[in-house]
Each structure stands twice: as structure tokens, then as C-alpha cells.
Image: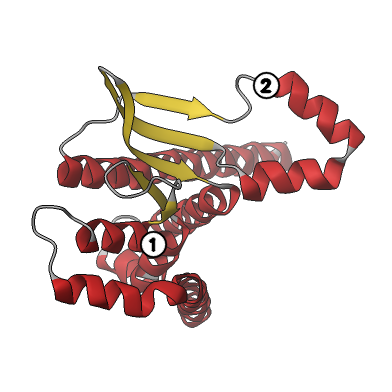
Amino acid sequence: MTYYLYAIKHMNKCYKTYINYLSWFVIILSILISVEILLITFFTGYPVNKLSFLLSDGFHFFIKYLLDDPLDTLYFVLIEKPLIKIEAIHNNPVTVIWGLHYYGFTILTHILLAALASRAISKYKLTTTTLKTFPMIGALLLILSSLFLYLASCCTGGASWIIHTSLLAIAFNPYNATESALEFYKNIQGWFNWMQFMMATLGTYLIILKIQKSN
């Protein structure tokens, strides 16, 4: 009898821990995406009014192609195309003002960081220890390396890495662009892919290093 009571208490404790972890995971993931949306809204002046999913309109086509050619289909869905688009659209005429494109890597990054943060909060509660153990700088670098932004004012070719898009918008701003800004952009134009890769690598390294130190 004592054994069963102990087992029930242990199961209840595990259940509460799991619910607490899952709750914080959802909250942190929502906060991450909300902050990104609010920042873009603040800088552009246009609030978000459209949310779209890649598979929502053509799920049956995805299943068909997945069965025919699974590798190419998964590559197309997870790498080539954004799984989620969050956009601000002007309706007269219909124009996409800006859009955050969440690719497979972007979503995986958000899930990973939300899981790490919820694990730290579940373990240390909302204390200074949580902040000390969580890899803030690494998380920021990894998030920045994974975000893709479209701006109608400068990105006619589609969404690009958010740092690239931001500098492009500054360099070719018709109202306050300067020669120095344009020259700076031209000098680093060919390095954006490497910069993005190095930022993701450095962010990942700092996260792993912080986790090893905190364990």
C-alpha cells in the first residue's frame, strides 16, 4: 500500500512538473514571436494583419509529393519555403508592406530556445539564477541569424536575412540615405551569407558553453 501511495505521489509530482514546463514553453515561445512582431511593427508603422501557413492550403498536394519524392519534398518544405508567414498587408491596392518568414530552421531555433528557457525557469524559478544560467547572448545571436524579413520598400526579390534587409532599407532609403551608408552596404554585400552563418555558429557555441558551465 505504501509503495502505491509513493508511486501516485511521484506521478503527480512528475505531472505537475511537466505541466509547469509546458506552460512556460508556450508562454516564452509566444513572447519571442510577439516581440519580433512588435519590433517590426514599431519600425515600419504597419501592424500585422495576416497569418499564413505553407501547408494549410495544399496539404493534400504535400502528401502526394511526399509519397512520390520524399527527399525533394522535405527539402522544399523545410528549407526552400517558409512554413509560416506573418505579414502586414495594405488592402488598397493589395500590397505586402512587410513580412516575417519563418523557415524550418527559424521555427526549430525558436522551439529550442523556448525549451531551454522553460527548463531553466522550471528548475530555478524566476530568480537571478535563471538569468545567470540562461545563455542570453547566444540566444540573441541565434535568433537574429534565423530571422528572415521582407520589406516592400527595398526587397522586391523576396525575404532576406533580417540584418541584410535592414541594412538594405537604410542604404536605399529615398529620404535619408547617405553616400557613406550606400558605400558601406556595397562593401559588405557579398558577405551576408557568411555573416549569418558565423552568427548562428557563434550563438550555438555560446549556448553550448553556457549549458556545460551550468550543469
Residue 106: x %, y % from top left: 51, 52
Residue type, label 1:
Leu
Secondary structure under the numbered disc 1 in the rendered image: helix
The image quarter in which residue 141 lies: bottom left
The residue singled out by tag 1 in the image is 144
Where residue 138 sits, quadrant-wise, is bottom left
Q: Is 173 positioned to the left or the right of 35 in the image? A: left
Q: Position of residue 91 (x, y in %)?
A: 28, 18
- Residue 39 is situated, as x and y percent measured from the top left of the image, at 22, 47
Residue at the spot 23% in from the left edge and 70% down from the top edge? 182
User: Is residue 211 or residue 180 the one in the foreground?
Assistant: 180
Which of the image's four quarters has the N terminus?
top right
Residue placed under numbered mark 2 in the picture:
58
Rendered position, 123 above or below 76: below
In the rendered structure, find residue 171 and report the number of the disc placed on it: none
Q: Amino acid at mark 2?
A: Gly
